[in-house]
Amino acid sequence: MYTAEFYEALGHLLFAVANTNSTMSLLEQKRINDMIHEEWAEVITEELESTTVLFHTVRKLALQRAVWRPCFKVFEEYYTENEAVFTEPLKEKILQNAESIVLASKKKMAQKTILQLTRLFWD
């Protein structure tokens, strides 16, 4: 089980991958929504579920018209401060999820984000 802060940082990362050129297609939105339900649904506390945090974070960033680099930076800082939380299987899962968004988007810029994520995890 992970914290609400973990899911907020993850939401920033998923948004960053999908929003690399400041637009998010309906296909990317659907992929993120499906991924949240299929891959990340869990109860954080009695009053809070991971899906709530993830959906709220992605929606807030979309409404703010956030850009990818500051969103990626939020995840990067969380990772740096909480590196022990990120086991190899967790890093693989996050990377696979990010790659899944890239496949849905077919944006070249999104591939750059995947490269940065890979460097963050394994450099």
Image: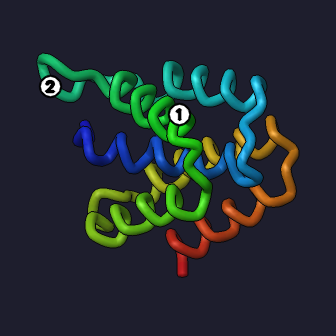
- Tag on residue 63? 1
The quadrant in which residue 15 appears is top right
Q: Residue at the far bottom: name it.
A: 123
- Against 101, residue 39 (above or below) is above
The residue positioned 53% from the left and 45% from the top of the image is 93
Q: Residue at the far front: name it.
A: 64
Identify residue type, mark 2.
Thr
The residue positioned 63% from the left and 70% from the top of the image is 116
Q: Is residue 106 left or right of residue 99?
A: right
Q: Is residue 24 left or right of residue 88?
A: right
Of discs 1 and 2, which sits in the foreground?
1
Query: Cα distance, mark 1 to mark 2?
Result: 26 Å
- Against 52, residue 75 (above or below) is below
Q: Earlier in the sequence, mark 1 or mark 2?
A: 2
- Residue labelled with disc 2: 45
Q: Position of residue 98 (x, y in %)?
A: 64, 47
The residue positioned 52% from the left and 72% from the top of the image is 120
The quadrant in which residue 88 appears is bottom left
Q: Position of residue 8 (x, y in %)?
A: 36, 43
The residue positioned 76% from the left and 46% from the top of the image is 102
Q: Position of residue 106 (x, y in %)?
A: 87, 44
Q: Quadrant of the N terminus?
A: top left
What kind of element bears circle 2?
strand
Q: Position of residue 66 (x, y in %)?
A: 56, 49
